[in-house]
Image (cartoon, rainbow, N blue to C red):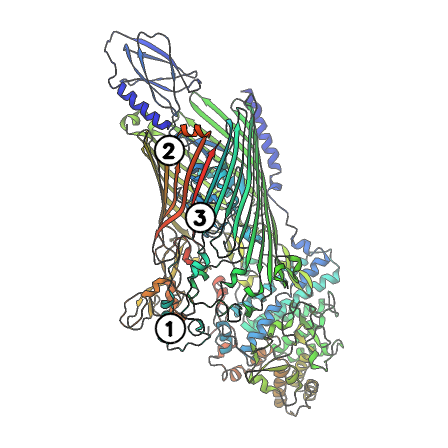
Amino acid sequence: MKNILKYGLLLPALLIFTCTGCRKMASTDLPPNQLTPDKVFGDSSSAVAATANLYTLFGTVDANFIRYIGTYTDELKTTTVSSVSTEFTNGSLTTGNTAVLSIWQNLYATIYKANALLEGIQPVKSLPPTLKNTCMGEARFVRAYCYYQLVNIYGDVPLVLTTAVTQNAKAARSPAKAVMTRVILDLTEGQRLLPAAYPFGGEKIQANRWAAAALLAKAYLFNNDYVHAGAQADQVISSGQYNLLSNLNQVFTANNAEAILQLWNSTGASTLNSVPSSGIPVYQVSPQLLASFETGDKRRTSWVNSVTVSGLQYYYPYTYKQRNPTTGPLAEYSTYIRLAELYLIRGESRLRQQDLSGARADLNTIRQRAGLPATTATTADELLTAIRQERQAELFNEGGNRFIDLKRYQTIDQVLSPIKPLWKPSSALFPIPQAEILNDPNLTQNPGY
Amino acid sequence: MKKTIFFMVLATLCLFFKLPAQELSPQFSQTLTGKVTDEQGKPLPGATVLLQGTRVPAITSADGTFKLFVTVKSGTLTVSFIGFQKASIPFEHTRTAPLSIQLTPDLSALNEVQVIGYGTTTKRFNTGSVASISAKEIENQPVSNPLAALQGRASGVLVQTTNGLPGGGIKVQIRGQGSLASGTDPLFIVDGVPFLSTSPYGSGALNGANGIISPLSIINPDDIESIDILKDADATAIYGSRAANGVVLITTKKGKKGGDRVTVDLTHGISKISRINPVLGLPYYLKLRREAFANDGVIPDVNTAPDLLKWDTTKSTDWQRYFYGKTAQVTTLQTSIAGGNENNQYLFSLNYRNEGTILPGDENYKKGGGYFNFNHSSNDQRFNLTLSVNYNKDNNHTLYSAINSGAFSIPPNFLVRNPDGSYNWDISNPVAALEQKQRSNTDYINVSTSLGYKLFPGMDAKISLGYNRYALDQVATLPQDSQDPSFDPLPTAYFSNSVSQRYILEPQLNYRKEISGDVLTALIAGTFQHVENTGYTLEGDGVSNPALLGNLGAANTIVNQINTYSLYKYVSVFGRVNYNRKKKYLLDLNFRRDGSSRFGPGKQFGNFYAIGGAWIFTEENGIKRSLPFLSYGKLRGSYGTTGNDQISDYQYISSYNAGTVYGGTSTLSPARVANPDYSWETTRKLEAALELGFIHDRILFTTAWYRHNSSKQLIAYKIPYLAGFASYQANFPAVIQNTGLELDLKVQALSGKGLNWTSTINLTLPKNKLQSFPNIEGSSYANTYIVGQDLSVKKGLKLLGVDPQTGIAQFADINNDGKITTPADLVVLGKTSPDLFGGWTNSFSYKGFALDVTMEFVKRRYLGYQPLLGAYPYNDPLFVLNRWQKPGDVTDIPRASVNIVSSQYNSTQLPDASYGRLKNLAISYTPKAALLKRLGLKDLQLYINGQNLWVIANKQRFDPEISGGSGGVAPLKSIIFGLKTTL
């Protein structure tokens, strides 16, 4: 009996001893290859690494834009016969199209990264203020870029501005107008936060103040707000930071003087439109795009190349000269915004504000660089047509510009119906991916799908 | 043998005392006294002493003595006590000295030791549901993975081979699928140390031709003493949060008392593929393809029909025999030395296995290692120590990728090489893939030790320590020309290394008290466990010299594909109280409080409990009298909770990990959408069972009914991508119910000097049901599961038939919209989980000969292999011969077509995949003792063991165990010859 008592008492004592340590024994620290947000944003170098990460999915998005928006509009044609690709060629997207989902998914995954960065960095006090501002400015810029593209492609889209998952998982679509207001707000704020110089290493692969201004100009242009669009474009042009390159073959090289924002990709820019070293190019320049070059246009010779296979000539985009994936130092970066576009935006804005001579001057700056004579357009209508034509030739295969322009000018049905058998007016917007609608009860489909 | 003697003695006694001496002499009376002891002379309190022909027994007191008042001069006393053979003792009034009665232990199977969680009991007194497989049953089977030995042996335990090649996967599922997503593997415990249940695939390990590696294949089956499978709440709740899917306890062999014995066991045998899938021969294949083009009016060209226009249409290869046709040689050697005295026992064994391959190359599998066990107890028996160390290593040379369907689907006339000698890539070339090799080395060490001390009579303190390390090192080499050149391949090699280490410390206090025939046992204990997993996979590209392909230093570029690290900590307190009243009423209470680092703050701890009870009703005098044909009867039941935490670590923490490189520098990326609120899946288990014994327990019959309700499902909860990720870890309020009936019958049909025959049958009738799933229509599971139905339901289009005029398959338009669309027109075609499974073992012995035969049977359907019907240059199963060929043909297989749309037909395939397999056949011969003596041997056995020798299944279809003809290799057929001798 004594024994039972003795050990009987010992046991609870032992248990109490072990259980005070219990919580510790059942919890672990994060492993060395993971960091909590407070650690990430408590340190300059990791905050910079998290900021650089915002851009990592753009390579995929950009590749999808060039390939699929290229074939969806009148820029490219392809030899690929997969159902994904055929739907783009025919203008008959389905809700299950994986490229449609990929664009959506990567843009929203990037938005999450930007939201997480903004939420994580806000409370941190230990970072140098300028660095903190730069990181936040990048996040604002990136988020704006994503929404700008989403609105262009899908129309009304859910406006997700936090990482609160339960709430986001039920998000409904916001009107495109409201989303664009947010884009302009983010860019204005980004412009305030970002430095004039390119941050974090000086390469043009992360936004600076002028990149924010350039995207802002595009956003205003999309909203038909020509006053602000022109003003932002003018800011960039007159910043003195950028010059049009006279050699067209260098316009897409890394960190060139004309580039405002470029995207870095580990295997180079060429994966976007690679062709086999011999044989028929997978992505070819469409007859429509080929025809849009005036005689003597140096872009036609510098940016389009051709190959002859079995006696037939195939034209393919040659803005990027590297034809195959490389692992060495990269000569070219995929270019998202460059100065030439800002001239065209300013020109169009001037035109809409009845400054015809100013518009003509901007247009001629671009034409002159392309080796073309000054425009013969005199009236406002003629000038508008000339600018549209110039945008087609100058900005092909860049950031989905053609698709946006066709809609902005309301010529999309007129241009694409004759060349796409299954084109419908509702095709101007992509379908919302079916996988998304399955998982979000409040998400609705675009008309026509 | 002892049983035989027992029955003989019993029979003799019966004859002898046929007419009990009952001379009635009412005047006479006397008091008989005596003492009842066990075989060692220790008193047995609580034994029943009864004069034959009377009804009032005497019960022995604490010192084993009894007094019985009788009114006869002579007669017979019947003395009985649980666990001992009933004894009949004659007496005469002339005798005055007290009777001394010694009982012999009853070797009924009911009294065999039964391993349970943290202790042992007997089958008779067990309140839980446990199935056991003995060393003998394992030894009879020539398998290299101990899990393969469980197939068909235990009710409620479905064992399915997913790949029959060495090291290949074996899936063990106890009482059905209780989890939607968080793993249905049971908890494996080897000598008290939890074992890795699945391949470390997620942390970088590669899958070779043998598929997902089964880590348990590293354990040598011959080192195992028993495998005990814990099923119900009573048996499993002591393992708390990890026990929802059941627990498999693997106990290794221990040293035994006696002189040193050296045992050598040598076997040699062969393995072959057990089934060649029936496919079309060349003429039928070519006819199918030509017919497909003709039916659609398409002119074949060299791109769409290289098989018809480019390859030689007269040359035919039987590809399955080409890839799997070799006979593998298997040699094993097992030696051991064991011995010991009262205080110290040891066992040391070495094992080696060399297995050739059925694959065409020089692949092979080698496994070897050692096992050491040492037990010590002090002279006063108060202190004891057990140490077991097991080290095994294997070397698996196999192919980088599974040949899979390539083996049967490539056309008989496939052109392997172009005229210039290079590989032909008109279609994927499985012959080229044979050049892609993989080598896997496993290093395994398991150390377990326990120190026990008897604090005072009845109270034992014990501390168990265990350490286990499983390391997998792999290299895969992919030469440039073995890869399809249209993807611009580089010569590539993968280097993978994953290590899983765990240690466990378990202090325990055991208490046992006997109170006038009642036994109280109590256990209180704690667990501290650490599991650390690390892994990486590197890819080395661009090695110029093929000979250096497996050398990382020779690669131009090295890409880090995966690098993982995780730490899992686990702490718990648990206890058990068991009360055995009068050997009739049993009560068992289990409790466990678990803390796991897999869950977020505030969610780490959970409580699990079980209550079990049993009533051995045949010990009730009334029932004993009214049901004399019953030698044993027990009713038992249990209810309790267990958990499942088979999810990844850290899912509750919002964190950043290494992201893609941008601008040449590394980045940090959000790792997940964190959810701090999830916790264990919980399974509530209810069981009721009836155990019966007839004819002195020569027939034992158990019926168990169970119901397991699994709730709080841990799933990767799908969220729209717009929330940033595809899913996050969460508990979902879906409930899965598994119910079933398990029947076990063991009959000692013949026993005696001549022929002995024991027959064992186990049968399981499982039912699985998704009981509830809130808002399933709105979830991403809407097309996968149906509330109220089995989790394995398969949906497809409903085939109405094939139009006899056109040969086109006709489907039911369920929503009547005039179109056949998915998912709108899908219907439930059936389920693939089994309706019934079991095994039947017959063991015969006659003199020195023994024969064991085990049949395994499963009744179920599976997703059939989908025929292409000529759409592509790939071969089809033989049953497509019955396809529609001309107007008027009535069949349910549509016409050949180059248009794959006709393959909507495919989704309607859910054929019967029931099978019966002659799982095991073991024949052995032991020479007479006299001969052994002359040879100077303690024991000698010659034997032949066969595994998977024969299968009965639908001959038209592919192997029934490999789901859907996915191409995994069916369990191999093997036969070995062995010689085992003890010096």
Q: Name the residue under label 3.
A: B270
- Distance from Cα at disc 1 to Cα at disc 2: 63 Å
Q: Using the image, tell me which numbered label, if any, was put on residue B290.
A: 1
The disc numbered 2 marks a residue on which chain?
Answer: B
Location of the N terminus of chain B (image quadrant): top left
Q: Which of marks 1 and 3 is in front?
A: 3
Determine the residue positioned at 57% across, 74% down.
Answer: A67
Q: Name the residue under label 2.
A: B848
Determine the residue positioned at 75% across, 63% down.
Answer: A130
Q: Position of residue B40 (x, y in %)?
A: 44, 19
> Do we see residue A180 in this rendering?
no
Q: Tag 3: residue type?
A: Ile
Determine the image quadrant of residue B99: top left
> Do we see residue B733 in this rendering?
yes
Q: Tag 1: residue type?
A: Arg
Is residue B526 depicted above or below A118 in this figure?
A: above
Q: SS class of the residue under badge 3?
A: strand
Q: Do the residues labelled 1 and 3 touch (CB within 8 Å)?
A: no
